[in-house]
């Protein structure tokens, strides 16, 4: 489709939804592969980079939406290979996440799904426990500050960190597991608010 559009053969241009669908297909491939899945992540990155380039240049029309970014992060989380392959996938995901925060006009504003997916990425791909906990804490605090703590974000954080650690982080932010400030979920649809 891209070649036909650029060659003037067709007026049909790829869309954000189309790119997201291809990235999702690579995420499924990474999850189902008996080997590591890192090849699927690298192929998804090529598609994701084309999407970002098209959004920057204006050749892909539409509103910047975090869905494609979350699809790409999910693809990264599906790597099941050796330590080095998981590390590569983690670095690719962190770079994409940081780029998203710096360029929301290209990637869309991070939302509760983005943070939930990054928590999943960090939990699955980090082999060093102290590094994992540092990433988890940073991501959770960012979600709190942005008002993006959904039920899914809270569950992912609690499920993938030790109880004493999650309690300390939540208390450090002036809350408890039973008393969650409304400011933490102010930008989340009511149906996805954390259970109190």
Image (cartoon, rainbow, N blue to C red):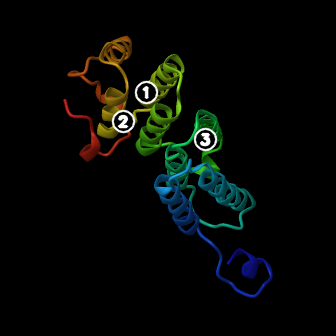
Q: Quadrant of residue 193?
A: top left
What residue is pinned by disc 1? Answer: 140
Residue 11 at what x, y percent from top left? 68, 84
Mark 2 vs mark 1, CA separation in Å:
8 Å
Q: Which residue appears farthest toward the right when viewing the image?
A: 7
Camera-nearest label, 3 or 2? 3
**Horizontally, is 88 left or right of 186 in the view?**
right
- Nearest the eye: 85 or 89: 85
The residue that disc 2 covers is 153
Horizontally, residue 147 falls left or right of residue 155, namely right
The image shows residue 57 at horizontal and vertical percentages of 75, 60
When the figure is inspected, residue 94 is found, relative to residue 35, above or below; the finding is above
- Checking the image for residue 89, the label placed there is 3
SS assignment at label 2: helix
* Residue in the foreground of this view, choosing between 66 and 181: 66
Residue 65 at what x, y percent from top left?
53, 55
Question: What separation in Å lies between label 3 and label 1 (alpha carbons)?
Answer: 20 Å
Where disc 1 sits, the SS reads helix
Q: Given contact means CB atoms under 8 Å apart, are the residues at marks 3 and 2 in contact? A: no
Pick the quarter of the image with the N terminus. Answer: bottom right
| Callout 3 secondary element | helix
- Mark 3 and mark 1 lie on one chain; the one further toward the N terminus is 3
Query: What is the quadrant of residue 174 in the picture?
Result: top left
Horizontally, residue 120 falls left or right of residue 9, namely: left
């Amino acid at each position: 489709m891209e070649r036909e559009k650029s060659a003037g053969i067709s007026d049909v241009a790829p869309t954000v939804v189309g790119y997201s669908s291809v990235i999702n297909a690579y995420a499924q491939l990474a999850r189902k592969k008996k080997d590591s899945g890192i090849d699927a992540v690298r192929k998804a990155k090529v598609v994701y980079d084309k999407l970002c380039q098209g959004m920057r240049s204006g050749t892909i029309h539409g509103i910047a939406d975090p869905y494609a970014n979350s699809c790409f992060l999910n693809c990264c989380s599906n790597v099941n290979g050796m330590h080095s392959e998981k590390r590569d996938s983690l670095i690719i995901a962190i770079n994409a996440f940081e780029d998203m925060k710096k360029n929301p006009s290209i990637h869309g504003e991070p939302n509760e799904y983005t943070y939930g997916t990054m928590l999943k990425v960090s939990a699955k791909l980090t082999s060093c426990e102290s590094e994992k906990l540092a990433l988890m804490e940073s991501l959770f605090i960012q979600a709190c500050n942005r008002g993006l703590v959904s039920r899914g974000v809270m569950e992912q954080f609690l499920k993938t960190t030790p109880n004493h650690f999650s309690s300390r982080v939540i208390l450090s932010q002036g809350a408890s597991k039973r008393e969650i400030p409304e400011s933490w979920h102010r930008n989340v649809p009511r149906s996805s608010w954390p259970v109190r």
